[in-house]
């Protein structure tokens, strides 16, 4: 039953959550900027332009930092809520009224579960909507850099390449499109080729307007063994593409899969555009991350669920040590997943299998 105590604890938790969110993400941004400031100043731009680039870059990357720190933010807010109650001797008053320490922690745990819904929404809605912005590098926030694009799958049977690709101008130079054969006798072999000196994106027609574009195809003359192949050259002015310029830009970064939603990842896996094991690793990590965040919260709470007054600094140090070990092992497992040929589920689930029982033991030893 929702009581006055629950409302009091939830208000305190939300206040601490907002404060932890602001402090930890601000600290992350400041440290990252301190280490990488030289990348923003490489082109010799003025102070105002540099300031604008810094703001533009970090404002879009806040959701990425939130995804990385969401568990820590929730744990800090929960532990801070109970620590304040203990420091002001309010826990003693609650226990004297017949409220157990488990009942005291219950609304905080429920609030922690609710905060994990923000993480799910962040992965499924926010990150996919700003994915092209996240693909930018610190030294090219405006997207003025020209890239090379090589053999990106476009649709079911085409590979698109370009010697120069400008995301800002939405233009490709020296475009090459290779269409794979769909004939049963030569499935997967090279079919037609489209070459163009320049291609400009046409959003209304969802394709590229070609300058000096030609389609090269092979036509067979004659029948049987006396037949021979000849190359047919046909001028073409437009190439319809399933990829928009933002997609080409996004795939220039190695982390682009992490910015996509589950539905997009499933579509890529179904069409075989990328390594399915890599997609499985990302999906396992996203499924286990909210669980890991709750375990992190449950590892820290028992140190502040005390019947008797204790040193907040001592208990905080113990909680910080245990939570830091859990966080680092989880982070290391995510790094291992991308470098070793292991089961995609193993690195994501090992921290839960290790620290889940530890959290249960700590909670079981709480004196109610």
Image (tube, helix red, strand yellow):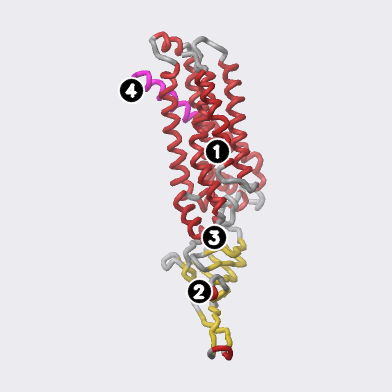
Mark 3, residue position: 248
Mark 2, residue position: 184
Q: Which mark is residue 243?
A: none
Quarter occupied by residue 65: top right
Q: Earlier in the sequence, mark 4 or mark 1?
A: 4
Find the distance from the CA under tag 4 to the CA under tag 2: 66 Å
Q: Earlier in the sequence, mark 4 or mark 2?
A: 4
Q: Which mark is in front, 2 or 3?
A: 2
Provide the secondary structure element on which disc 4 rests.
Answer: loop
Is residue 12 inside the magenta stretch?
A: yes
Bounds of the magenta segment: 1-21
Mark 4, residue position: 2
Camera-side residue: 177 or 272?
Answer: 272
Q: Which mark is residue 349?
A: 1
Q: Earlier in the sequence, mark 2 or mark 3?
A: 2
Q: Earlier in the sequence, mark 4 or mark 3?
A: 4
Camera-side residue: 73 or 24?
Answer: 73
User: Relative to 322, is 345 above or below?
Assistant: below
Q: Are marks 4 and 3 in contact (CB under 8 Å)?
A: no
| Residue shown at the point (47%, 49%) measured from the top left | 261
Image spot of residue 204 (x, y percent)? 41, 66
Q: Quadrant of the N terminus?
A: top left
């Amino acid at each position: 039953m929702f009581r006055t105590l629950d409302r009091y604890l939830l208000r305190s938790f939300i206040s601490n959550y907002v404060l932890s969110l602001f402090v930890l993400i601000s600290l992350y941004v400041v440290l990252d900027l301190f280490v990488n400031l030289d990348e923003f100043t490489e082109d010799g731009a003025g102070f105002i332009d540099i300031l604008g680039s810094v703001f533009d870059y970090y404002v879009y990357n806040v959701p990425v930092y939130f995804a990385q720190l969401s568990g820590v933010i929730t744990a800090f807010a929960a532990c801070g809520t109970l620590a304040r109650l203990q420091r002001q001797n309010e826990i003693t008053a609650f226990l004297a009224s017949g409220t157990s320490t488990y009942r005291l922690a219950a609304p905080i745990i429920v609030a922690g579960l609710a905060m994990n819904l923000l993480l799910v929404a962040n992965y499924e809605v926010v990150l996919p909507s700003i994915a092209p912005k996240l693909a930018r590098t610190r030294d090219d926030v405006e997207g003025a850099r020209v890239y090379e694009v090589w053999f990106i799958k476009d649709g079911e049977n085409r590979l698109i390449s370009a010697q120069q690709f400008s995301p800002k101008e939405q233009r490709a130079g020296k475009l090459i499109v290779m269409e794979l054969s769909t004939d049963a006798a030569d499935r997967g072999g090279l079919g037609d080729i489209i070459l163009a000196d320049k291609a400009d994106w046409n959003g209304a027609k969802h394709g590229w307007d070609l300058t000096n574009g030609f389609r090269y195809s092979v036509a067979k003359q004659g029948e049987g063994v006396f037949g021979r192949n000849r190359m047919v050259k046909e001028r073409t002015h437009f190439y319809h593409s399933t990829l928009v310029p933002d997609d080409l830009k996004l795939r220039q970064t190695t982390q682009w899969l992490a910015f996509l939603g589950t539905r997009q990842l499933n579509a890529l896996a179904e069409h075989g555009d990328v390594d399915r094991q890599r997609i499985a690793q990302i999906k396992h990590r996203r499924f286990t991350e909210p669980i890991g965040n709750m375990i992190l919260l449950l590892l820290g709470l028992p140190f502040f669920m005390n019947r008797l007054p204790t040193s907040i600094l001592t208990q905080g140090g113990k909680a910080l040590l245990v939570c830091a070990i859990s966080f680092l092992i989880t982070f290391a497992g995510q790094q291992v997943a991308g470098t070793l040929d292991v089961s995609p589920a193993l690195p994501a689930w090992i921290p839960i299998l290790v620290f889940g029982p530890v959290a249960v033991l700590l909670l079981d030893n709480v004196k109610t």
